[in-house]
Image (spheres, rainbow, N blue to C red):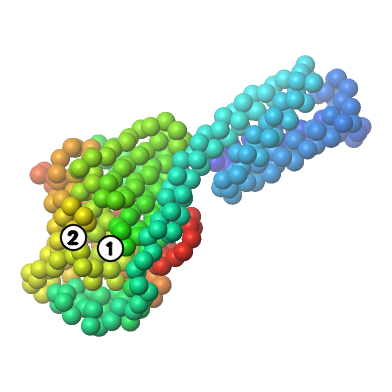
Amino acid sequence: MKFIFAAVIFIHGLIHFMGFAKAFNYGEINQLMIPVSRTIGALWLLTGFLFVITAMLFFMKKDNWGMVAAVAVVISEVVIIMSWKDARFGTIPNVLILAAAFFSFTAVRFENTFRADVQQQFLSNNSLPASLLTEADLQPLPAPVQRYLHYTGVVNKPKVKNVRIVFEGQMRSRGKDWFKFRSVQYNFLDEPARLFFIKGKMFGVTVPGYHHYLQQKAVMDIRLFGLFGIVKMDGEEMNKTETVTFFNDMCLMAPATLIDKRIRWEAIDDTKSKAIFTNGNISITAILYFNEKGQLINFTSDDRYDVNEKLWIPFSTLVHEYKKFENHNLLYKGDAVWHYPEGEFVYGKFLLKDIEYNGNEFKN
């Protein structure tokens, strides 16, 4: 679809060069019977270049392609009307391109809400001290958690105030097919905030969604073209569920944050530890499982709400592979799993593509 649409824009642009050629007598242009002045011919040329640029910007996934397309369509329609008898069919691709540009604009506007929230958090959520995590910081933690922090390589490195995480993968609901996604998220640790923007591919169409967890309140907002609401959920169940997800991110994506005073640790044995994480008036419980290498291999909690089934369902994150990112050994491949009474159901496959700690500006 992407290639076809870019090709349509590009070819539509090339056709506009015929109006320029007609005006300046470059060859026989029999398709245009009505005379074209040089001034109008220059507009045909300009429009052709604008459509070619639009095709390039669209193909490169630049957000401003829709703005250039809208300008091109307006000029194009003016010159088409002036040669209506010969060029009227050019209105059809113009309408298609303008509609696509409009929906691109609404999607970008929706995503800009996410950008603005991230930028606001950079301004207001940055009071944690910039100090190193030391061996002494680890002493109150259960032994397997200490080994995990050593394995990940966070000791004697800066403590984490915020983290940017980029995932690619697949997701699904029960009874539905997998769809591919790419997500960008920012987590802030001073006043816990998780801002997660996802773009899923369904039937060749990008469907954006924004999950934001701020001031102990969570909202999931999914919109077709960033305009038409598909799912919007909030409430106490979502608040607690996103608190679990936030703590899950701390454990797997930002292990240096596990020395947080909001976590109460309870030792179980040499391979398991229990954690109770509290954010304001919300407390959640999780069990962390470790192997002999010191890797965190599973995270389980009973405090997540399945919004599709409308039930509290045991949840786990199963880690398949670790990889070095920013001199840290972190989850590379993992599965998100619901544990239904009838059996396990993997609903998400995650592949970590990029991670950055303690940034100070928005990056996509």
- Disc 1 to disc 2, how far (Cα)? 11 Å
- Mark 2, residues whose alpha carbon is within 10 Å: few (<14), some, or many (≥20)? many
Secondary element at image label 1 = helix
For marks 1 and 2, give the one nearer the viewer.
2
The kind of residue tagged 2 is Phe
How far from the left and from the top, in percent, is residue 332? Answer: 34, 64
How far from the left and from the top, in percent, is residue 235? Answer: 23, 40
In this rendering, position of residue 52 left or right of residue 295: right
Badges 1 and 2: C-beta atoms under 8 Å apart?
yes
Taking depth in this image into account, of 14 and 303 the one nearest to the observer is: 303
Q: Residue at x 39, y 70 (%)?
A: 325
In this rendering, position of residue 52 left or right of residue 195: right
Taking depth in this image into account, of 235 and 168 the one nearest to the observer is: 235
Q: Residue at x 77, y 26 (%)?
A: 79
How far from the left and from the top, in percent, is residue 269? Answer: 8, 72
Let me know if residue 60 appears in the view.
yes
Q: Residue at x 84, y 29 (%)?
A: 40
Q: Which residue is mark 1?
A: 250
Between disc 1 and disc 2, whose residue precedes? 1
Taking depth in this image into account, of 102 and 290 the one nearest to the observer is: 102
Taking the view exactly as shown, the residue that stands out farthest to the left is 268
Q: Which residue is mark 2?
A: 277
Image vertical order of residue 104 relative to residue 357, above or below: above
How far from the left and from the top, in percent, is residue 277? Answer: 18, 60
The kind of residue tagged 1 is Met
Q: Residue at x 40, y 67 (%)?
A: 357
Image vertical order of residue 269 relative to residue 306, above or below: below
Which mark, residue 90?
none
Residue 82, quarter of the rendered image: top right
Let me know if residue 204 appears in the view.
no
- Mark 1, residues whose alpha carbon is within 10 Å: few (<14), some, or many (≥20)? some
